[in-house]
Amino acid sequence: TALAHWSSKANRAARLTRARAAVEARRMVSVKRRSLWKWTIGWMRATKLGIERQEEDARKLVRLDEQVETITDGNAKLEARRDLLATQEGELKLLLESREEERRHAEESIAKVQQ
């Protein structure tokens, strides 16, 4: 009976040890699962923030493109206006020169008639 008693105590101790080991293993798995879950949630949040930042950057680039396009259009209009003014200036110079030449001819004619 002493041997059976000792044997049952040893079995009981072994069972308790196995039970404690199983509880500890489940706790560790739970901690690791929680840690992994927290890391996953953190990674997802960081990814979401990264995507939101990329979208905001893309919107900024679109706005900048629109501004550049507006400025380019404005510059093209100014360039066209400048070309038109240069053309008009050239025409006015030619007209002025022809008028001065006509005036000179008229003065020469008047001078010849007066002589």
Image: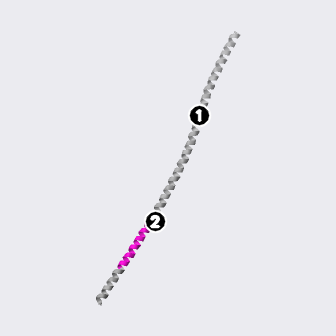
Task: Please tell me how crowded label 2 is: few (under 14), some (14-19), or many (20+) other residues with Cα within 10 Å.
Answer: few
Side of 100 relative to 31 (left or right): right
Residue 34 falls inside the magenta stretch: yes
Side of 105 relative to 46 (left or right): right
Looking at the picture, which amino acid does disc 2 mark? Lys
Q: Quadrant of residue 39?
A: bottom left
Q: Position of residue 82 (x, y in %)?
A: 59, 33
Q: Are marks 1 and 2 in contact (CB under 8 Å)?
A: no
Q: Quadrant of residue 9?
A: bottom left
Residue picked out by circle 2: 38
Task: Magenta stretch: give its range.
Answer: 17-36
* Residue name at image x 34 percent, y 82 percent: 13
Task: Choose the circle earlier in sequence order: 1 or 2.
Answer: 2
Secondary-structure class at tag 2: helix
Residue picked out by circle 1: 80
The image quadrant where one finds the N terminus is bottom left
The image quadrant where one finds the C terminus is top right
Farthest residue, direction right? 114
Secondary-structure class at tag 1: helix
Q: Is residue 68 above or below residue 15?
A: above
102 and 51: which one is in front? 51
Q: Between marks 1 and 2, how big is the CA–CA gap?
A: 62 Å
The disc at residue 68 is none
Q: What secondary structure is the stretch in magenta mostly built from? A: helix
Looking at the picture, which amino acid does disc 1 mark? Ala
* Residue name at image x 56 percent, y 44 percent: 67
68 and 1: which one is in front? 1
Q: Is residue 13 above or below residue 67?
A: below
Q: Is residue 51 above or below residue 99?
A: below
Q: Position of residue 102 (x, y in %)?
A: 66, 18
Task: Please tell me how crowded label 1 is: few (under 14), some (14-19), or many (20+) other residues with Cα within 10 Å.
Answer: few
